[in-house]
């Protein structure tokens, strides 16, 4: 996991409602001040690690954490 991936996972995990406006990609891009490509690559890294999954069947821009992702965040925050 890259440092940016950890920050992205933290932001996704904090969004417990799973609702993003306008979408998760753009929110995380703005909050972390990174490029859209960096966010999308991070999403793919985290999906391969089984730490996040996608809401809906559209573009992969609205992530939510999996049980593994939530447990990982709980361990590193304690």
Image (cartoon, rainbow, N blue to C red):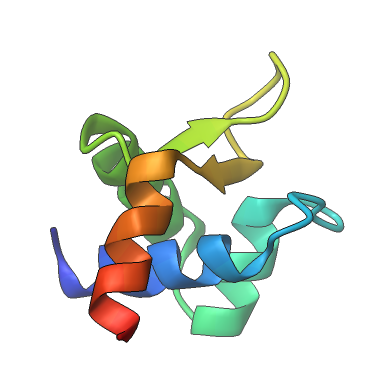
Quarter residue 34 falls in? bottom left
Q: Nearer the viewer, residue 9 or 75?
A: 75
Give the residue at the far top of this rendering.
57
Apparent side of residue 7 relative to residue 33 in the rendered image (left or right): left
Quarter residue 66 falls in? top left
Give the residue at the far right of this rendering.
21
Q: Nearer the viewer, residue 69 or 36?
A: 69
Residue 23 lies, in percent from the top left, at 75, 51
Q: Is residue 22 above or below residue 35?
A: above
Q: Nearer the viewer, residue 63 or 16?
A: 16
Q: Is residue 7 above or below residue 62?
A: below
Quarter containing the N terminus: bottom left
Apparent side of residue 35 relative to residue 20 in the rendered image (left or right): left
- For the image, the number of numbered tags is 0
Residue 7 lies, in percent from the top left, at 37, 75
Quarter containing the C terminus: bottom left
Q: Is residue 16 above or below residue 10?
A: above
Residue 49 lies, in percent from the top left, at 21, 38
Quarter residue 27 falls in? bottom right
Residue occupying image coordinates x 69% and y 13%: 57
Residue occupying image coordinates x 60% and y 82%: 31
Residue occupying image coordinates x 79% and y 55%: 17
Apparent side of residue 42 relative to residue 54 in the rendered image (left or right): left
């Amino acid at each position: 996991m890259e440092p940016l991936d950890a920050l992205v996972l933290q932001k996704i995990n904090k969004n417990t409602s799973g609702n993003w406006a306008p979408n998760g990609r753009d929110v995380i891009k703005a909050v972390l001040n990174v490029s859209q490509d960096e966010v999308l690559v991070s999403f793919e890294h985290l999906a391969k690690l089984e730490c996040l999954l996608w809401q809906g069947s559209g573009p992969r821009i609205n992530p939510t954490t999996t049980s593994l992702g939530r447990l990982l965040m709980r361990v590193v925050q304690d």
